Amino acid sequence: MADEPLDAPDPEVPEAGELPDDGEPPDDGEIADLGGMRGVELSAEELAAIREATSASMTPGSVLIVSRPEDREQWSIDLDGAGLDLVFVGEPHQLLIALRDRDVESVIIDADACPSGGLPLLAALRNAGERLTQRIVVASRPTRTHVVSCLAAGATAYLVRPFAVEKLLEQLRG
């Protein structure tokens, strides 16, 4: 054993992508390759369910953006090409209607567009029982009190303008 090199493959463990030589051929693609762990048998229904779940998790839901009408074009330009379904709203009741009518994954609240800095919107999201992936607040002139209040009210992130669009996208993707 001392003469064998440390990097020598274990003769009983097949290499990734190889099947053990047991004389049985695979059943027409029903053996799943799980990162080199071959030999796990899945039914066609299980494979279809895995594909559906994987593709669904890769398709983002809508991103609701609460902003001033004059800022919406800039939001669209900044997030163009990210593959996001952007929905703009300006009033709290519009936000709640959009949440009810759409598959919403994230909400961006432009605190500069809200007289109360977005806190009532965060409270409305919490009271509506919405389980969003991300609740992001964006502001130009934050105060320590506002940041803490937003995070305590349920914001998952707080970004200060100017911010890198990549940072926002990183927050949206979780």
Image (spheres, rainbow, N blue to C red):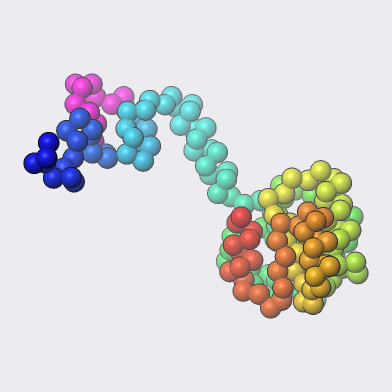
The image shows residue 104 at horizontal and vertical percentages of: 72, 50
Q: Is residue 11 left or right of residue 47?
A: left
Which quadrant of the figure has residue 15? top left
Q: Is residue 97 visible?
A: no
The image shows residue 121 at horizontal and vertical percentages of: 85, 57
Q: Residue at x 55, y 49 (%)?
A: 58
The image shows residue 63 at horizontal and vertical percentages of: 70, 57
By secondary structure, the bulk of the magenta-drawn segment is best described as loop
Where does the magenta region start and end? 18-29
Q: Is residue 15 left or right of residue 102?
A: left
Which quadrant of the figure has residue 120? bottom right
Where 95 falls versus 36 (above or below)?
Answer: below
Residue 26 is a magenta residue:
yes
Q: Is residue 27 visible?
A: yes
Q: For this rendering, which residue is in front, 32 or 102?
A: 32
Residue furthest left in the image: 3
Counting the numbered discs, the total is: 0
Q: Residue at x 43, y 24 (%)?
A: 43
Q: Quadrant of the C terminus?
A: bottom right
Residue 51 is a magenta residue:
no
Q: Residue at x 28, y 26 (%)?
A: 26
